[in-house]
Image (tube, rainbow, N blue to C red):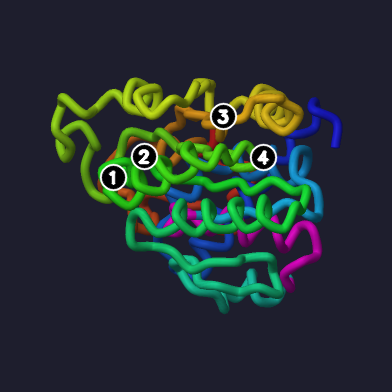
Amino acid sequence: MALARLKSKSNAIRQDVLRVAVKNNAGHIAPSLSCIEILVALYYQVMTPEDKLIFSKAHGCYGLYSILTDKGIMSRERWENFDLPGCLERMPKYGILAGCGALGHGLPIAVGLAYGAKLRKENYHVFCIVGDGETQEGSTWEAIQFAVKHKLNNLIIIIDDNGLQAMDFRIKILDIVSENIERRLQGFGLNPIRCDGHDTDTIARVLSSFKQSFSIMPHVLIAKTVKGKGVKCMENVAKWHFRVPDGSELPKRDNLQTHSLFH
């Protein structure tokens, strides 16, 4: 897909997520909206059929479901009726290789896949989308330490840095001393790159450059995002982690594509 069309696709997926979630009274809309552009860049521009994705921030899986449906991998009926887990579970037939949800589970799995590919001399990349709240988990840093030691340059870590963890802002939850994720990654010998997590062109360009890089180390993209992106009442508001808009907040429920909540 041409880079110019990625933004349009992101907007369509965002509208689809809100429409289906509201229709089925499904929560976890806001964490899904923060990573739409990341998923669109991966699925429509960057990943090959051989590449693997571990979606560690599993509460944000609605965007993934919408994209899999749009690409014909998941049935429209399952998505429209939300016959799906609200927190991602393992479904290999859809390319969903791991169930996550509890913080810090996804990256160790992704590291294992990348290490296995190296041992078998298989030529594909493993992507892992991690929530910024997961950076407080020891298992995340143990996985990074292993990946650096074994020079897993086929591993690409994407941190959805939306500043919120569940029902509060991350800075209130974590020790302020350990707040600088970029500095901590550099301490492990990595060279993380920051970008606007809602700029699909930049995301696609950076991730594609990682795949073509001659670096011997894992790659990290810190994508600065907004939780609830695109819906005015949800953006950067902690209470929307699991809430569904009611009639007063989203009155035109049958016409979400043109509703004034969208920017």
Kind of residue at badge 4: Ser
Q: Is residue 250 above or below residue 220?
A: below
Magenta span dominant secondary structure:
helix
Above or below 39: residue 263: above
In terms of depth relative to the viewer, which is nearer, 22 or 184? 184
Q: Residues within 10 Å of mark 2 (few under 14, many from 20)?
A: many
Q: Earlier in the sequence, mark 2 or mark 3?
A: 2
Range of the magenta residues? 56-75
Q: Dividing the image into 4 quarters, which one contains the C terminus?
A: top right
Relative to 64, say whether 202 is above or below. Answer: above
Q: Which residue is mark 4?
A: 10
Is 185 contained in the magenta span? no
Q: Residue at x 55, y 75 (%)?
A: 84
Q: Which residue is mark 2?
A: 132
Spatial separation of the CA atoms under disc 2 and disc 3 = 16 Å
Label 4–label 3 contact, CB within 8 A: yes
N-terminal of the pair, mark 3 or mark 1, is 1
Q: Which residue is mark 1?
A: 165
Q: Which residue is mark 3?
A: 198
Question: Which of the two discs, 4 and 2, sits closer to the camera?
Answer: 2
User: Which amino acid, mark 3?
Assistant: His
Q: Position of residue 180 (x, y in %)?
A: 29, 23
* Mark 3, secondary structure of its residue: loop
